[in-house]
Image (cartoon, rainbow, N blue to C red):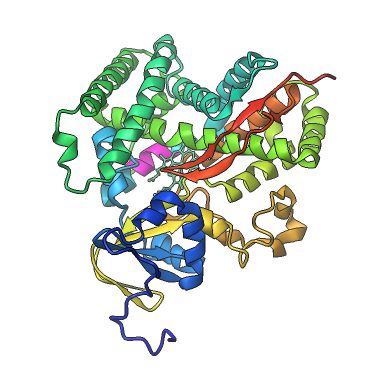
C-alpha cells in the first residue's frame, strides 16, 4: 500500500511469528541482534509485541532522522531514561525539554576541543601505566580491563585531585551496581519491585549513598578552593547559563557527575574491546595500524596534537563504531498521536531503533559485515551512506562526549599497538551479544610485548 492511499489510522505492519502471551519477547531475549536485522525486511516501520504491549521499530534511516531530529520534541526519551533518574537525578542524561536544554548548554563547553586537550593527558598517562603492566603471557579479560581503564580516565578527568584518585575504587564498585539497578527497574513499569527491600535493592541504596558521599565531599572541597582547576568538575562549576547567568547548585553538580560516569566508561571500553577483537583477526589491518603508529609516534604514546595525524587509527575506530555501536538499541516514546512514514503511532507508544541493524544494512553500507576501515576514505564515499552512520546518536540528545571518546579510544589503541601484539586465546570464540550495550562475549586475549 502506498503512503498516499493509506488511511491516517493505518498501523505499521506486524512482524509475524508472535507467540500467544510473550509476543516477540522471547526472540528479543534470545536472539536480539539477528531478530533486529531480520525485521528490516517487513518495512520501514514495523509493529512488534512485547507481552501485552505493542512497540514500533523504525527500520529506515530517514524516518529515524525524523524521530530524533525533525520531530524530536514529539518523541521524548523512553522508560530507560526515566528509570535512570533513581541514579542520575536531574542530570543531562535524564532531564527533558527546557531543563534538558539548559543543562546541555552548561555541560557542552566542558567538552570542546581545547578542554579535551587537557583530558587527553590523563588518557595518555592512564593508558601507558595500565598497558605497560599487562601480563606477558596470561590471557586478559579485555572488556573488564577497558572498563576499569575508562572508569579511571573518567574519574581523573572529572576530579584532578588527591580526593579524586581515592574516589576511583568507589566509582569502579558503584558503576556496575547502578547500571544493573537501572536496567532491572526499566523492566518493571509498575515501579513495585524497586520498593521491596530485597538484598539487591538494599545494595543499590547503599551504593548510591557511598557514591553521593564521595562526590559531595569533593564538591565541598572545590567550593573551598581559591582557584579553579582544569578538570571537568571545575568546568561545570564555572559554567554560567548565558540567558540567566545562573550556575549549577551542588545537587545539580552531583547529578551531572553521575551522568558523565554512567554514559562514558562502558561505551568507550566496548569500542576499544571490539577494535582489539577486529585487529587480532585482521593481520593486514593490524600491520598497517602498527606501521602508522611507529612512523608517527616513534615508540611513544600519542600526544593530543598527534591524533589528527593518525588517520588510519581514526578510520579503525570509526569502522569499529559502525560494526559494533555500543548503544545499539534505544527507545523514545510518542508524546501524542503521530504519523510516521504514513503510519499511525498512537500516543504513549514505545518507539525502538537499532544502530546495529542500521549500520549493517547492505542498502546503506556495502559488504556491511566486513571490517574495512578504508570504506571511510573520501574516494570510497559510494560505499557508505554518511547520514546513516550515527553511533553517537543525533538531535537534541546527541552525545556530548564524542571528541572525548574518540581521543580516548585512539590514544589507548595507539599505545597498545606501539607496545603489544594482540592474539586471540586459542580455541576462544567471540560473539556480539546485545544486552543494554553491545557486549563481546568470550573476549579473552593474549598481548605479548612486541619483539622489535
Ligand atoms: C564510544 C563511546 C560513546 C558512544 C558510542 C556514545 C553514544 C551516545 C549516544 C548514542 C547518545 C544519545 C542517546 C540518546 O539519543 O538517547 C549519547 C548521549 C550522551 N553521551 Fe555518549 N557515547 C560515548 C561516549 C561518551 C563519553 C566519553 C561521554 C562523556 C565523557 C558521553 C556523554 C554522554 C552524555 C552526557 C549524553 C547525553 C546527552 C544529552 O542527552 O544531551 N558519552 N552517547
Eyeballing the image, is 134 above or below 79?
above
Does the magenta run of residues contain 366?
A: no
Where ligand 1 lies, by image quadrant?
top left
Give the dominant element type of the magenta stretch: helix, strand or loop: helix
**Vertical placement of 224 versus 425: above or below?**
above
Image quadrant assignment for residue 166: top left
Q: Residue at x 41, y 19 (%)?
A: 228
Q: Tell me which corner region of the image, top left, top right, bottom left or bottom right, holds residue 337.
A: bottom left
Residue furthest bottom as drawn = 5
- The residue segment tinted magenta is 103-108
Q: Position of residue 307 (x, y in %)?
A: 68, 34
Residue 116 in the image: state x and y as whole percent: 54, 32
Does 11 sit above or below residue 110? below
Tell me if residue 236 can be seen.
yes
Q: Is residue 400 left or right of residue 310?
A: left
Residue visible at 59% across and 50% down in the picture: 322
Q: Residue at x 42, y 19 (%)?
A: 159
Residue furthest toward the right?
Answer: 452
Q: Count the marks.
A: 0
Q: Position of residue 61 (x, y in %)?
A: 50, 65
Q: Residue at x 37, y 38 (%)?
A: 106
Q: Is residue 104 magenta?
A: yes
Q: Position of residue 146 (x, y in %)?
A: 54, 27
Q: Considering the image in quadrants, where does the N terminus appear?
A: bottom left
Visible in this render: residue 245?
Answer: no
**Quadrant (top left, top right, bottom left, bottom right) of the C terminus:** top right
Amino acid at each position: 500500500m502506498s503512503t498516499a492511499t493509506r488511511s491516517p489510522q493505518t498501523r505499521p505492519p506486524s512482524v509475524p511469528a508472535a507467540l500467544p502471551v510473550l509476543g516477540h519477547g522471547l526472540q528479543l531475549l534470545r536472539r536480539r541482534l539477528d531478530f533486529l536485522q531480520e525485521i528490516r525486511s517487513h518495512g520501514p516501520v514495523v509493529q512488534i509485541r512485547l507481552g501485552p504491549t505493542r512497540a514500533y521499530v523504525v527500520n529506515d534511516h530517514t524516518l529515524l532522522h525524523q524521530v530524533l531530529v525533525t520531530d524530536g520534541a514529539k518523541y521524548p526519551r523512553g522508560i530507560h531514561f526515566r528509570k535512570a533518574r533513581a541514579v542520575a537525578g536531574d542530570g543531562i542524561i535524564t532531564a527533558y525539554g527546557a531543563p534538558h536544554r539548559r543543562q546541555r548548554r552548561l555541560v557542552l563547553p566542558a567538552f570542546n576541543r581545547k578542554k579535551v586537550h587537557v583530558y587527553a593527558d590523563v588518557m595518555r598517562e592512564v593508558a601507558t601505566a595500565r598497558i605497560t603492566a599487562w601480563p606477558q603471557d596470561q590471557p586478559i579479560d579485555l572488556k573488564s580491563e577497558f572498563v576499569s581503564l575508562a572508569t579511571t580516565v573518567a574519574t581523573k578527568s572529572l576530579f584532578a585531585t588527591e580526593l579524586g584518585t581515592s574516589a576511583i575504587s568507589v566509582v569502579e564498585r558503584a558503576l556496575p551496581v547502578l547500571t544493573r539497578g537501572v536496567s532491572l527497574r526499566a523492566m518493571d513499569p509498575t515501579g513495585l519491585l524497586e520498593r521491596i527491600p530485597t538484598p539487591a535493592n538494599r545494595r543499590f541504596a547503599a551504593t548510591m549513598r557511598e557514591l553521593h558521599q564521595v562526590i559531595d565531599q569533593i564538591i565541598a572541597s572545590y567550593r573551598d578552593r581559591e582557584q579553579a582547576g582544569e578538570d571537568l568538575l571545575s568546568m561545570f562549576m564555572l559554567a554560567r547559563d548565558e540567558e540567566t547567568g545562573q550556575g549549577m547548585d551542588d545537587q545539580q553538580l552531583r547529578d551531572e557527575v553521575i551522568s558523565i560516569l554512567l554514559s562514558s566508561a562502558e561505551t568507550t571500553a566496548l569500542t576499544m574491546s571490539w577494535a582489539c577483537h577486529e585487529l587480532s583477526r585482521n593481520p593486514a589491518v593490524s600491520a598497517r595500524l602498527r606501521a602508522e603508529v611507529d612512523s608517527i609516534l616513534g615508540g611513544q604514546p600519542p600526544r593530543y596534537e598527534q591524533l589528527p595525524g593518525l588517520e588510519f587509527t581514526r578510520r579503525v575506530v570509526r569502522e569499529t563504531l559502525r560494526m559494533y555501536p555500543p548503544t545499539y538499541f534505544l527507545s523514545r516514546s510518542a508524546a501524542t498521536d503521530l504519523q510516521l512514514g504514513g503510519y499511525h503511532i498512537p500516543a504513549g507508544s514505545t518507539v525502538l531503533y537499532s544502530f546495529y541493524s542500521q549500520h549493517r544494512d547492505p542498502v546503506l553500507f556495502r559488504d556491511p559485515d566486513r571490517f574495512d576501515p578504508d570504506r571511510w576514505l573520501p574516494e570510497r564515499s559510494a560505499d557508505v551512506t554518511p547520514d546513516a552512520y550515527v553511533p553517537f546518536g543525533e538531535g537534541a540528545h546527541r552525545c556530548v562526549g564524542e571528541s572525548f571518546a574518540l581521543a580516548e579510544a585512539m590514544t589507548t589503541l595507539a599505545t597498545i599497538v606501539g607496545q603489544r601484539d594482540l592474539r586471540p586465546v586459542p580455541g576462544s570464540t567471540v560473539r556480539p551479544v546485545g544486552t543494554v550495550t553491545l557486549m563481546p562475549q568470550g573476549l579473552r586475549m593474549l598481548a605479548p610485548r612486541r619483539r622489535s
